[in-house]
Amino acid sequence: MTVLEAHNLTVSYDKQPVLWDIDFEIPSGQLVGIIGPNGSGKTTLLKAAMGILPADSGYVRIFGKPINEVRERMSYVPQRQSVDWDFPATVMDICEMGRYRQGKLFGRLSKIDREIAADALERVGMTSYRNRQIGELSGGQQQRVFIARSLAQQAELYLMDEPFVGIDAASEETIIALLEDMRSEGKTVVLVHHDLHTAIEFFDWIVLLNTRLVAAGPKADVLTEENLRTAYGGKLNLLSKVTELIRKKEYPLREKRRTE
Amino acid sequence: MNSNLLWVLVGCALIGAGASLVGSFAYLRKKSLVGDAVAHALLPGVALSFLIFEEKSLWVLFPGALIAGWLSLLSIEGITRYSKIKSDTAIAIVLSVFFAVGIVLLTHIQQGNYGNQSGLDSFLFGKAAAMLPRDISLFITVDLVLIAAIWLFYPYLKLYSFDEAFARSVGLPAKRLEFLISTLTVLAIATGIQAVGVVLMAALIITPAAAARFYTKRLSSMLGLAMAFGVVSGVGGVFISYLAPSMPTGPWIVVLLSFMAIFTFIFAPHRGVYQRYMSQVRHRRKMNDENVLKLLYHLDEANPGLNYSSTDLSAKRYFESGPLQETLKRLSQNGLLKSINSRYKLSETGHHEAMRVVRLHRLWELYLNVRMNIADDHVHNDAEAIEHIITPELEEALLKELGYPALDPHSSIIPGVKPALP
Amino acid sequence: MNDFWIILTGVLVAVNCGLLGAFLILRKMSMVGDAISHAVLPGIVIAYLVADSRNGVVMLIGAAGFGLLTTFLIEWFYKRARIQADASIGITFTWLFAIGVILVSAFTGNVDLDQECVLYGDIAYVPFDLLFWNDQTFGPTPIWLQSGNLILILATIFIGYRGLFITSFDPGFATGLGIRTGAWHYALMGAVSLTVVLSFNAVGAILVVAFLVVPPAAAYLISKKLPTLLWLTVLFGILSAVSGFYLAVWWQASISGSMAVAAGFLFLVVFILSKLINVRHKKHESIRFSESHIIAPTP
C-alpha cells in the first residue's frame, strides 16, 4: 500500500523554486530517509506533505487522500531548534500535546488520553523526567520527548525533521531502536536526515533530493555513485542560472490551467 | 521671526542627518528597535541632570542623556545575555521601565518648586520651535563627530554591519566597534529628541534607513540617501508647523518621513510593490503572447495555411477568454499576426518568433531529459514554464551544452538550430 | 475611598495586561505589543471626538480596531513590501502614533485629552469618572470596564488554554494537527488591542507596555510551568500596582509611572535573586529580529 505520494510537486519560497517537479511514492511499513545537500528542499518536502507550506503546483496524497482528510493518521516532529526550550512547560505537558485535536481543543483531556501520553513517555524512556522543565534536558532527551509526543498521537505515518542532529550516542541508539520497533508494528516513518554517512544503515528506502528528485526507491538502488554525484556534486550550471532568473524576475512559475 | 525659523530649520536638518546616518548602521545590524528603547531611556537621564544641576541648557542635560542611553544599552545586553529572556522582551522592558522612571522624575519635578522647569516636558514630544543658536552649536558638533567617526572607520564599520560573523572571524575588534557604534547612536539620539521627542525618535532612526535601503545595496549610497530623507523630512516638518503654528513639529516630521518611505516601498524601481506587480503583469502578457504563437505554429505544422478564430484556439488549449482576446489584438497590432475577419494566422515575423519559442521549449525538454534524467513524459510541463524565461545567452549556453541537437525527447525537430561554425 | 479605586484600577490594569503580555513574551511578540499600544492612539482620539456619553464604550472598541490594523500593516510591510521585521514594526507604530499626536493637538479644545495624558494616563481621575445610570452612580466607569475586560480575558485563557499553549510553543506541530494558528494569533492581537485601549485612560499609551511585559517577564524568569507563569504574573502585577501607588504618594509623582517603576524594580529583584539561586537558562542569543517576532506563526 502506498502511504505517501507526491506528483509534480513544485514548492517555492520567495519566488525561488525549492522543490521542482517532485514525483515519488513511498510504500507502507518502511523506514524512509530523505537526504540531500543543504538547501535541497528536504524540510520543505516534509512541510508540503503536512500541508504547512502551499504547493505552487502538483500535490501530495497521504493514504490516497488529501492531507486534511487524514491528519489523525499522521504525525509531524519538527526540528528541535524550531522550538524555544525555555518555554515554561514540563516533559509531560509536551507529551500530552500529542493528544490535542483540532476539534477537541477546548475541554479536558480524558483519563485515557493521559494514559496514552504516559505510555508514550515510557516507550522513549523519559518517565522519570516527566515533571522536569524541558529546558533542563539534553538534546537527546528533548528529541525523545518530541518523539513521545508523536507516539501519543498513535498515528500510522510519522514525518520527522532531522531527529538525529546534535544528540548523544545513547539517545541516538534509543531512537533508532524505537523507530525499528515502530516499523515492525507496521508504521511508516519518513525522516529528513541531515547527514549522508551516519545512521544510513538503518533506512530501507531513500529519497534523494537536490531541488529536483534525483532518485527514490530501495536504498541499494538509490545510493549509487552516479546518483550521489548528481545530488551532491555541485549544482548544474544552467539549472542554477535559470533558477536565479526566475527568482530575480519573479516569474509566475505556473500558468493557469483548466484543471488546477 | 525669520531668523528663529532659520535656526530651527538648520537644527532639524542637522538632527535628521545625524539620526539617519546612525540609523543606517542600526538597520543593517537589525537593531533598529534598540534605538527606540535608547530614545525612551534618555528621558530619566535628562530629568536627572536637571534635578542635579537645576538648569535647562542642552549642554548640561546632554551628559545625563548620554549616561542614560548607555545604561539602557548595557541593560538590554545584560538581560538578554544573562537570563532566558529573549531580546525583543528585553528591549520592551528597558524601554518602558526607563521611560517610567523618566515620567516619575518629570512629574516629581513638576510638583516641586524647581524654578525654570517648564518646558522640560518638551523632550517628550520635541519642541523644535524652542531651538536656540547655542543648541545648534551642539548639533553641529555632534554631526561633525558622527561624520568624522564614520569616515575614519568606514571599512571596519561596513564590514561589521554587513557580516558581523565574518568580521569577527577576521579579527576585527568587535568590542571596540560595538562601543563606537553604540556611542555614536546614543549621541545622535540624544541630539534628536530635541526636535521630535523621545517617543518619535525611533522614526528618525528607522525610517530613512529602511527607505534608503530600498534603492541601493551599497553602503555609501544608502548613507547618502538616508541622510537626504532625514534632512528633507526635518526641513519639511518645520515648514508645515510654521505654516500651521498650533501644530507640533515632531509628529509632522515623522508623518512626512513615513509618507516618503511608503511611497518608496510602493513605487521604487525594481523592488517597489507596484513595480513588482507590473512586472508580473508583463510576464503574464509575454506568456500569453508566446503561448498563442506557439499554438498557431503547432497548428500550422499539422495543417499549413489555415486561419483560426479565438474559439478555435480555445478549443485546442486552455485560455481565459478575456486575456485571449487582448493577446490576439496585441499580437495583431505588433505585426506578429495577420487578422482577417477575426480569424488569425501567423505573419512572417510571427512565424519566426513562434519558432523561437518552440525551439526553446524543445531544447529545455531535451536538457531535462538528458542532463537531469527526467522522464520523457515529465518534461513538458516544466518546459511550458521555462520557455518564456530563457534569454538568448542562456539559449546559446543550452545549445552548446547539448551539442546543437536536431531532435527533442519526443523526436520532434527542434526548429532553427544553427550549428556553430567550426 | 478614592485611593482604593485608584489602586484597584491599577491592579486590574496590571493583571489584564500582564496575562496577555505573558503570551506575547512567549510568542516573542513583545515589541508588537509595544507597537499596538502606540498605534491605537489615532483610534482613541477619533473615538473621543466622535463619541458621546452613550456610545463611548463602543467607540473605544472601534479604536481597538486600530490595534488589529497595526498587525496587518506590519505584516504588509514585511511580506509585501519586503522590509525587515524590526523596521516593519518601527515604521508602522511611529507613523500611527505621530498621526495620533497631531490629532490630539489639532483637537485639544474638543477633546478631553492632552499630551501628558497620552503618555501616562490620568489614573488619579478615575474615582471621579463615575458611571451614571438612571441618575444613580455605580462607582467609577474604568473599574467596570477593567473588570469586564478581566472576565473576558480569564474566560479566554481558561477556555482557550490548550490552544494558546500549543500555538505559543510549537505552531508547526499545531498546524500539523490542523489547528488554525493564524486565527489564534489574530485573536490574541485583538485581545491585546482591546485591553490597551481600555487601559489608556488609566495609564496612557506608553506605560501600558510596562504592564504588558514587565511582570510576566519577571515571572518567566522563575516559572517552570505555564500555570505558574500566569499566577506569578497576577501576583507581580498586584504587587507592582499596590506598591507603586504608595511610592507615588511618597515621591509626589505620577501614579501610573510609579506603578511601572515598581514593576521594574520587582523585575530587577527577581532577576538578581534568580541568578543567585542559579536558575538554569539557555545561552544567550544575539539581538536579532526575525520573522518569528512579528507575524502570525507560519512555521
Image: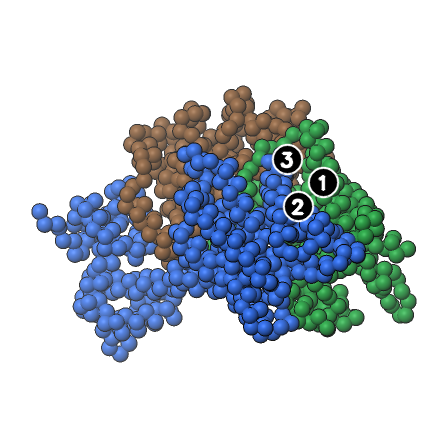
Chain colours: A brown, B blue, C green
Q: Residues within 10 Å of mark 2 (few under 14, many from 20)?
A: many
Q: x, y percentage for residue B360?
A: 24, 54
- Give the answer, above or below, for where A5 lies relative to C256: above
| Residue that label 2 marks | B93
Q: Is residue C150 visible?
A: no
Query: Mark 2 and 3 residues: CB-CB less than 8 Å, in contact?
Result: no
Disc number placed over residue C15 in the picture, else none:
none
**The residue under label 3 is which amino acid type?**
Ser
- Most foreground residue, B366 or B174: B174
| Residue that label 1 marks | C267
| Residue that label 3 marks | B83
Choose the circle earlier in sequence order: 2 or 3.
3
Q: How far apart are marks 1 and 3 (CA)?
A: 12 Å
- Most foreground residue, A121 or A2: A121
Q: Is residue A138 visible?
A: yes
Q: In which quarter of the image is the N terminus of chain C?
A: bottom right
Q: Do labels 1 and 2 share a chain?
A: no
Q: Mark 1 lies on which chain?
A: C
> Which residue is drawn at the image coordinates 46% and 47% (left, top)?
B149
Q: x, y percentage for residue B116?
A: 73, 59
Q: Residues within 10 Å of mark 1 (few under 14, many from 20)?
A: many
Query: Mark 1 and 2 residues: CB-CB less than 8 Å, in contact?
Result: yes
